[in-house]
Image (spheres, rainbow, N blue to C red):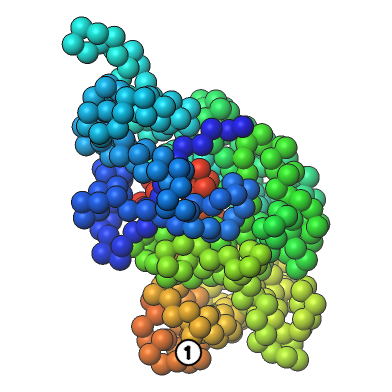
Amino acid sequence: MWPKVCLQAAILEKTFMKAPANFVSAMRSILDFNGKVMHSTYMSADPRSTKSLPRNPGSQSALRQSNQQRIVETLLNAGPLTQAELSRHTGLSTATVSNLVKIMSDGGLVSTAPTTSSGRRATSVRLNSNGAVAVGIDVGRTHVRVAIASLGYRVIAERSIKLPLGHLAVEGVKAAADLLQGLLHDAGLPASAVVGAGVGIPGPIDSRTGTVIQGAILPEWVGINILEMLEDALKVPVYVDNYANLGALAQVTWGVHSAVEDLVFVKIGSGIGAGLILGGSPYYGNIGVTGEIGHATISEQGLICRCGNRGCLETVASTAIMIELLSRGAPAPITTEDIIRLAREKDSATLRVIDDAGQAVGRAIANVANLLNPEVIVVGGSLAELGEVLLEPIRRGLIRHAVPVVGETTHLVMSSMGNRAEALGGAALVFQHQGIGATVSSGIAV
């Protein structure tokens, strides 16, 4: 059984200022906003589930979490203290402090060392910002990316490799495991430092079973219990989620939107999906299948989609369809990188395809905006480098099809994380499920 540290994540008020990159200052900002400790409803009762379930504020677990937060806050303000000093500062009994320090030490949140106090033997306790690491894994149609992040939300190591089109689940999982092992070795980290792995899959995941559902971009993965397969290969607790959900989580943990409570992240790639942050927490719906805007009907007489329906958004706006359209008549099949290059070269056919795709995406997210009225919609994916070339037609489609006041007040931006968002969101998911760390960052630190 892997130890869990129960320091809870904080819900950030809209007025929350950007936290500094320094770990201690960031944690102090989290735990001491307006002079009080804030609590989160993001913790899940089931460590294998990606659903957001509220904790019971009157439970023993909640009391333990609150006491641990008092210890962390005290260490942030006072620095290293003996357990006896912690007891005096927090008002907790010495037995309670000793028990909680052991739990926190096992989980890597604090480190202890023998010392002397007033001529007596004692135990010194200090916060350990690098004692526990989380792994974020993004598995795509033709790639896998692995990132290792420390408790202070700092990327320690990160790497991406190509995968063959149509790869099997066992191949993708092995590639991720090998990549993780290599990164740990290069960073000089023991496997025991890893508290868990958050894995993003490009398709709907049934949170009840951990299986990939029909309609995923990786048809070879459909019906497979990817959760069990990953845990067997990685030897750590694993949290599986749709990659768009992890992209959304990254925006409010690693990105500049940490104070935003209602956000939609739209991932445009081989497929198109959306991750939802509502009321400060990820929204998963009934069985974890949400944000499937790639299967919103754009044209009832359009192409047949991989989901079995006709005229879905993905059939007119995914990078896969863009590549197919632009490869016709080309001397060789083009790539996503070619689309970006041709757009920068002002190639008229490329710009037209991007414009048509962007307007279709804008029309689809207008329905999302009308329904949810989010403060921010972030667009990400492999074409994020295009910036306004892609964002401008999306904005046109949004304003044209949304209720006027919604279209005018919804802040539409391009993600600054590029292809990293899903892996970074995976690491954030681990820390939040384990109760380590917080939903805050001053930006991506590498």
Residue lying at the far top of the rendered structure: 119
Most foreground residue, 246 or 355: 246
The vertical placement of 287 against 91, above or below, is: below
Residue lying at the far left of the rendered structure: 118
The quadrant of the picture occupied by the C terminus is top left
Q: Which residue is mark 1?
A: 402
Q: Position of residue 170 (x, y in %)?
A: 78, 45
Please say whether residue 318 is visible from this viewpoint.
yes
Q: Residue at x 69, y 70 (%)?
A: 320
Please say whether residue 446 is visible from this viewpoint.
no
Q: Residue at x 62, y 60 (%)?
A: 242
The quadrant of the picture occupied by the N terminus is top right
Most foreground residue, 51 or 95: 95
- Residue type, numbered disc 1: Ala
The vertical placement of 48 against 78, above or below, is: below
Most foreground residue, 83 or 191: 83
**Left or right: 74 in relation to 417:** left
Most foreground residue, 329 or 292: 292
**Left or right: 228 in relation to 88:** right
Label 1 secondary element: loop
Q: Position of residue 423 (x, y in %)?
A: 55, 50
Number of other residues with Cα within 10 Å of mark 1, as a class: few under 14, some 14 to 19, many 20 or more:
many
Q: Position of residue 430 (x, y in %)?
A: 53, 46
The vertical placement of 77 against 19, above or below, is: above
